[in-house]
Image: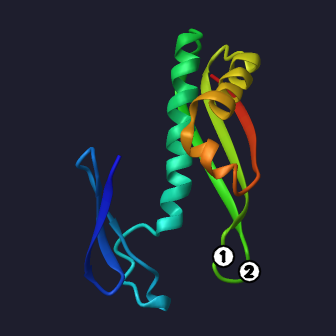
Amino acid sequence: MDAKVSWHSGLQFTAVADSGHEITLDGDPSVGGTNLGARPLELMLMSLAGCTGMDVISILKKKRQDVTAFEVKTHAERAQNHPKVFTAVTVEYIVTGHNIDPKAVERAIELSEQAYCPAQAMLVQAVPISHTYRIINV
């Protein structure tokens, strides 16, 4: 897997990886950016949410859970001083559907955490990650 960023001006870059999809990166105006793209650490949280989200929804569908909506929210606490690394991450899964089985949700999260999500496997080496979930039965 390969990725590259190409600088435009200020702190704005265009990022592209093997899939060919481009993402704009930029910084906050307070540090010289123009706020025209995502911050690199935001992308790390989005990557974690996307990686585990793909696992969990796939597992829930295989378990024949009637999911009608699904969200994964991530929240990171950061160190006060530079390099302001993540010090704790929380992943919240919000599963909406009909007669959703909490055990199926718990197992799907566990499988993603322990076996399938490479983003989570890498990040947990550097920062503790906790998981919560909510089920909204409609």
Query: Would you say 27 lies left or right of 124 here?
Result: left
Identify the residue under disc 1.
84
The dot on residue 114 is none
Query: What residue lies at 55% left-to-right and 45% top-to-bottom?
Result: 119
The image shows residue 78 at horizontal and vertical percentages of 70, 70
- Image height check: is 34 above or below 88? below
- Alpha carbons under labels 2 and 1: distance apart: 6 Å
The image shows residue 74 at horizontal and vertical percentages of 63, 51
Please name whichever residue, 120 or 37, is drawn nearer the observer in this view of the structure. Answer: 120
Query: What residue lies at 75% left-to-right and 20% top-to-bottom?
Result: 102
Looking at the picture, which amino acid does disc 2 mark? Gln
Q: Quadrant of the C terminus?
A: top right
Looking at the picture, which amino acid does disc 1 mark? Lys
Density class for disc 1 (Cα within 10 Å; few <14, some 14-19, many ≥20) is few
Q: Quadrant of residue 114?
A: top right
Q: How is the image coloured?
A: rainbow
Please name whichever residue, 65 or 56, is drawn nearer the observer in this view of the structure. Answer: 56
The image shows residue 118 at horizontal and vertical percentages of 55, 40
- Image height check: is 3 above or below 99? below
**Callout 2–callout 1 Cβ contact below 8 Å:** yes
The dot on residue 80 is 2
